[in-house]
Image: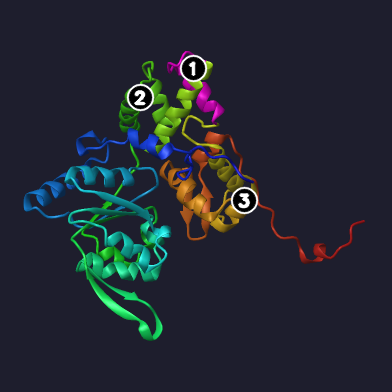
Amino acid sequence: MVIDRVLSGDSRGEGEEQFNYALRPKRLEECIGQDNVRQKLAIAIQAARKRGEPLEHILFYGPPGLGKTTLAHVIANEMGAAIRVTSGPALTKQGDVMGLLSNIGTGDILFIDEIHRLSTPVEEFLYPAMEDFKVDFTVDSGLHAKTINFPLKRFTLIGATTRAGLLSAPLRGRFGILHHLEFYSPQELTQILRRSAVLLNLQADAGTLELIAQRSRGTPRIANRLLKRVRDYAQVKGAGRLTAKIVSDALRMEQIDELGLDELDRAFLRALATVYGGGPAGIEALAATLGEERDTLEDVVEPYLLQIGFVRRTKRGREITPEACRHLGLKIASPKGPLPQKELFEEDV
């Protein structure tokens, strides 16, 4: 069963990266939310500028869509540095990393998204680059192989990951600054939407942006995406202005309820309640039941359901909570026990 998920962190329309980038803040003072992280970054940036040195290596971790990539670009702008962007899966061999490192200037930033997905050889190749700003690169092979020591210019590596637990201890220990990004409050999301609406030249009635913020799962990426979908609906079905009815109708069409749950969230909760008797149920069993990948459930669905108290994680598996049942009007089905041994072999009459 494949469900079209508007809230997926991986969904991106053609050419949308440039469009999304226009909505991103470019300076630290333009950022909204994550107050503690912003304050610490401001101090680190000011101190590095006074010393005339690049920043220490930085690791951002947390659920998708909270601004890890945005903060990397903001830091580059604040430091007046060039930024090179890549991802863990794209760096498959040492030569891929060498091509990036050899072109990095002093103070420049190398941003690696999903850094937990680096292969072991590539990760180990980065260790001396991060610590000593030099690498030993092997050229040729066999009898003609030789190792060349390449000095590197001092740079800043910024890593981003949604699965910090999958980072190896040696790699994590080489980051001087580590920041965990939290979900945003509805008030912070409303401010973000207000800024985005101005950039999109979108008129909105009082209270309409709050309606979108409440259904955005505490995630700015989702808030901006829903704002664009509501804008499309308003231009086709209305006069282009956001009203309470337009917003409600648009989000209803997207199958997003008042708490921000979409059809995949509800399918996850229904499976727990009706198929597995409320749980506990293993994540692999749930993934097989829903026809989804395990990583999708763990990275996209579960974090928000855990945050709002609709799911519990136990040693035996996932369990649904009474609050989730009340919200969806579900009744937990009584699990059927195993048949008695004699009934297994009785012929039907």
Compare marks 3 and 1 and give the one earlier in the sequence: 1
At 11% from the left and 46% from the top, the residue drawn is 46
Compare marks 2 and 1 and give the one earlier in the sequence: 2
How far is disc 2 from disc 1 in space, using C-alphas? 18 Å
**Element under label 3?**
loop
The residue carrying pointer 2 sits among few (fewer than 14), some (14 to 19) or many (20 or more) residues within 10 Å by Cα, namely: some
Foreground residue among 195 and 20: 20
Which kind of residue does numbered mark 2 sit on? Ala
**Element under label 1?**
helix
Which kind of residue does numbered mark 3 sit on? Gly
Residue 242 highlighted magenta (yes or no): yes
The residue carrying pointer 3 sits among few (fewer than 14), some (14 to 19) or many (20 or more) residues within 10 Å by Cα, namely: few
At 48% from the left and 60% from the top, the residue drawn is 315
Dot label at residue 235 = none
Residue interval drawn in magenta:
238-254
Q: Which residue is mark 3?
A: 291
Q: Which residue is mark 2?
A: 197
